[in-house]
Image (tube, grey):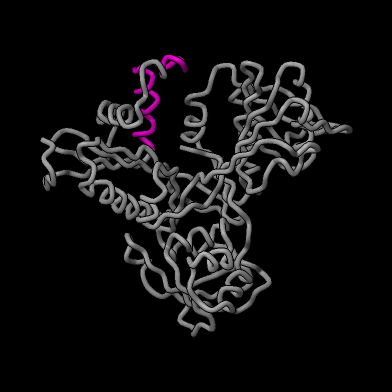
Amino acid sequence: MNGKNNKNYIIRNLTTKDLEQYNALLRYAFQVTEQELAKYGWGDEEIKQSKFPVLERADILGCYDGETLVSQFAVYPLKMDIYGAVLPVGFITSVSTYPEYSGQGIMSRLMKKSLMGMREKRQSLALLYPYSIPLYRKFGWEIISNKISYVIKDRQIPSKAGISGFVRRVGWDSRDFMELHTAFARQTHGCLFRNSLAWEEYWRWADDDTVVAIYYTEQGDPSGYMVYLIRNDVMYIKEMIYLNREAYNGLWQYIHAHDSMIDEVRGNTYFNEPVAFDMDDGDIKETIRPYIMGRIIDLEMFLKDYRCDPQEQNVCIAFEITDPVLDWNQGTFHILFHEGRCRLTDDPAEYRVSMSIGTLTTLFLGYKTAVQLYRRERIQGSERSVQRLDDVLLHETPYISDYI
């Protein structure tokens, strides 16, 4: 059944009828044990029920050897803020293959077919959490965001006086809570809008005593929240978002109110700026690691909604792009940057640069500047062309906190 280089594999979309095999492959590939499920109060039947809506609403390609599912590749449909424009994107997850079928090119076939499907659905950008950065780089992906983990001792927790608002603990299904995230996504470059499927994934493995606390202004307007858990004298912050500095200070004041209950705070942030800078005592432990990778699926489609510097006018740059997977991204593209928008053009280009589709993705998403990439020999071109490229682009690092 699992003969090497078997050419009779069948690739098709999974349906709810494939639930048993989909779940079995996930469990095997990610080595989810019965003990781990029990720790979170999950039984095998509950896992199957929780994955049922995924099969209904996500696009999942599977490779079959006869009647046996041997590899799968899922795409969650989401929306993402990119410099104020909302773009449909695909978040790739559940990438898994039984070990005896690895090395046969199955995953590359599933990836290309999935990317083609995303293009048909007008999703011009794909995201994923990589299990191997070198592997995905070979297929045109590149790092686009970081995750910063921090540890703050109780004596280092900031306390801001004069906050006029208040904090209230609310239920997981609080409308204020979910609407706050939507408001945050609208004003935050790179943030994903959470649909019902994303919210289900957000809570899937949460402990029952996980708490949601919202900061309200003096007028009663919600403007920030934190999701946290206190265990063994440690406050674990799953997420903290805020629409303004008042909410930021108010949430840290709320954390400070727990100083008699905890020895330290552990949390994560996804802005590309260390937490230490905002601390009175900034001598804290921070760990920065790459988090999400992305790749542009269709450059022309992506450009239709992409925003650039509104002060730049009539700047035409020729991009020589290589793409190891998608032929339509391969070639030379003349892009006109004009008053905040950009488009393909036949006009002659005054400047010229060369790069891979992965480098273009991390550049256009703002993870690295053109000068930084040029110094790393990831962009080829004259120094003047590279500088003009930085001039026309906006520069803000993506905030991507969701891991689907």
Estimate the x, y position of residue 346 in percent, counting from the top left. Answer: 45, 81
Using residue 94 as the reference point, say whether residue 314 is left or right of it.
right
Using residue 277 as the reference point, say whether residue 197 is left or right of it.
left
The magenta region covers: 37-57
Residue 12 seen: yes
Tell which residue pokes out farthest to the right in this image: 162
* Residue 46 belongs to magenta span: yes
Q: Nearer the viewer, residue 260 or 364?
A: 260
Q: Main secondary structure of the magenta part?
A: helix
Using residue 131 as the reference point, say whether residue 362 is left or right of it.
right
Q: Nearer the viewer, residue 85 or 263?
A: 263
Task: Name the residue rendered at 32%, 55% in the picture.
Answer: 116
Task: Name the residue rendered at 64%, 31% in the picture.
Answer: 177
Estimate the x, y position of residue 124 in percent, counting from the top left. Answer: 44, 57
Estimate the x, y position of residue 305 in percent, counting from the top left. Answer: 53, 61
On the image, which quarter does residue 149 sit in? top right
Task: Name the residue rendered at 82%, 31% in the picture.
Answer: 159
Task: Name the residue rendered at 48%, 29% in the picture.
Answer: 200
Instruction: Using the image, determine if residue 370 lies above or below residue 83.
Output: below
Work out which quarter of the rendered image holds the N terminus and state it.
Answer: top left
Instruction: Using the image, determine if residue 20 lies above or below residue 310.
Output: above
Q: Nearer the viewer, residue 354 or 121?
A: 354
Estimate the x, y position of residue 374 in percent, counting from the top left. Answer: 53, 68
* Residue 25 belongs to magenta span: no
Residue 176 seen: no
